Image (tube, rainbow, N blue to C red):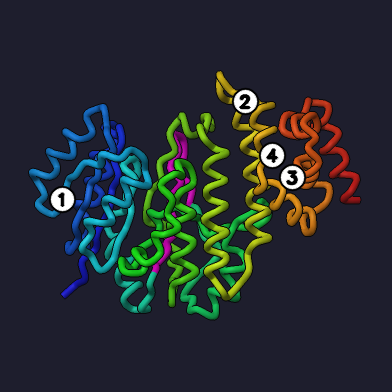
Amino acid sequence: MSKLVSVVIPVYNCEKYISECLDSVTCQTYKNIEIIIVNDNSTDGSRAICEDYQKQFPKITLTDNPEKGLVPTRLAGMALAKGDWLLHLDADDKFVLDMIEKMVAVADYNNADITICDFFKWTPNKITVMKHNYNGLFDKEKIKAEIAPNIIPDSTQKPIYPCTWTKLFRTGLLRENLRYYDKNVRMGEDILLSYPNILFADKVYFLNEPLPYNRHSDIQMTKSYKPDYLNDITNIYNNLKNLNNDYKEYDFSLQLCNWYVLRAFDVVRNEKKSEKGDIEDIINKLIKSPITQEACNKYDAFANKGHVESEFAKALKDGDVNKIYRLAFPSKISRIKRKLKKIYDLH
C-alpha cells in the first residue's frame, strides 16, 4: 500500500489564488494524501472557499489557528499530520499534477529522508526554472563534505533554496528538529525548517526537475518593506548558531557571520522603504548589537576586500554611521566610481 502524504497549506487572505492552489493538490495523480488547511485569521473570502473544497473532498481538514503568524500556522498543520511524508505548500502557489507521485517514488527508491526538487519562479510576465546546485543522492558523508560547507548561502554561491515547498520531508525527521523553528521569525523562517533537517538527515536526494510553481506578485516584485527585519535576522542568527553548536560534523560559523553581514546591509536599505522608517535609529541598533560585533569580527577575517559588504562590515565594527549610510545609499557618482574601480582592478 502506498504511504500517506500530508500536505500542509497555511492560508492568509489568498482568495484570489487559493482555488488554483487547491485544484493542484486535489487533482494529484498520487491519491493517498491528506490536505491540512490552516486558516491564519484571514479577513477576506479565503476561508469560505476552503469550506467549499472541504465539502467536495473528504481528504481535506480545515482548521483555524488562533495564534497569528506563518510559523505558528505551519506548526499547527504539522501537529495534525498523520502522513509518513510531509509537504508544505503556500496558498498562492501550486504543484504540477504529478509532483507528489514523482517525489514519493524517488524518496522510496532511494530511502531518502528528504527529497528536494527544482521549481518554477512564476512572475506576472514570465516563468523561470530555478535549479539547485546539486544532483542525486547524498548520504551523511556527502552531506558533511559537500552540503554543510555551503549550507548558509552568501552572495557568491548558488544556495540550496530554503523554501519548504520544494521538499518532501520524512515526517518523523521534521518533528525531531522543530526546536529551531522560531515563532518569533516573520520573514525567512523557512531557513530554520529546511537547513536543520538537511544537515541531520541520513540521506537527501536532489531531483533536478521543477515541480512546484512559486508565484511572485507585483507587490513582491517591487520589493516591499519588511517590518521587523532586524528582529528576524537576529532570531534566525541565534537559532542557526544553536544549530551550528548541535551539528558536530562541520563548523559553519564563518558562513553564518557572512550571512548576517549581508542581511544587515539589507536591513539598512529596507528601512528607507518605510514611511515611518528611521534609518539612523536602525543603524545605531545594528552597531550596538553584540551579534553585529561578533559577526563583523569574523567577517573581516575572511571576506573579499573591496566589496561593499566588506567596507560595510568594517564601518559597522567601527561604529561609523555616516559611512554606513553612504554605502547603503550611494550617490550616482559614487556608483560610477565604484564600477570604474572594479573595471581597472580587473586589468
> Of tags 2 and 1, which is closer to the observer?
2
Q: Magenta part of the protein: which range?
A: 114-129
Please name the residue that numbered disc 2 is placed on. Answer: 272
Residue 158 in the magenta stretch? The answer is no
Say what amino acid the circle numbered 4 marks: Lys
Residues at circles 2 and 1 in contact by the CB criterion of under 8 Å: no
Mark 3–mark 1 Cα distance, whole angstroms, equals 47 Å
Q: Is the magenta stretch mostly helix, strand or loop?
A: strand
Please name the residue that numbered disc 4 is placed on. Answer: 288
Residue located 56% across and 20% down the image: 276
Residue 137 vs 301, above or below: the answer is below
**Which label's residue is closer to the chain start, 3 or 1?**
1
**Which label's residue is closer to the chain start, 3 or 2?**
2
Residue 347 vs 202, above or below: the answer is above
Marking on residue 322: none
**Which label's residue is closer to the chain start, 4 or 3?**
4
Please name the residue that numbered disc 3 is placed on. Answer: 309
**Which label's residue is closer to the chain start, 4 or 1?**
1
Residues at circles 4 and 2 in contact by the CB criterion of under 8 Å: no
Say what amino acid the circle numbered 2 marks: Lys
**For this view, does 157 lie left or right of residue 37?**
right
Residue 131 screen position, x and y as percent: 51, 57
- Place residue 231 in its image quadrant: top right
Residue 336 screen position, x and y as percent: 82, 32
> Of tags 4 and 2, which is closer to the observer?
4
Marking on residue 60: 1
Which quadrant is home to the N terminus?
Answer: bottom left
**For this view, does 143 lie left or right of residue 346?**
left
Q: How crowded is mark 1: few (under 14 residues within 10 Å), some or many (20 or more)?
A: many
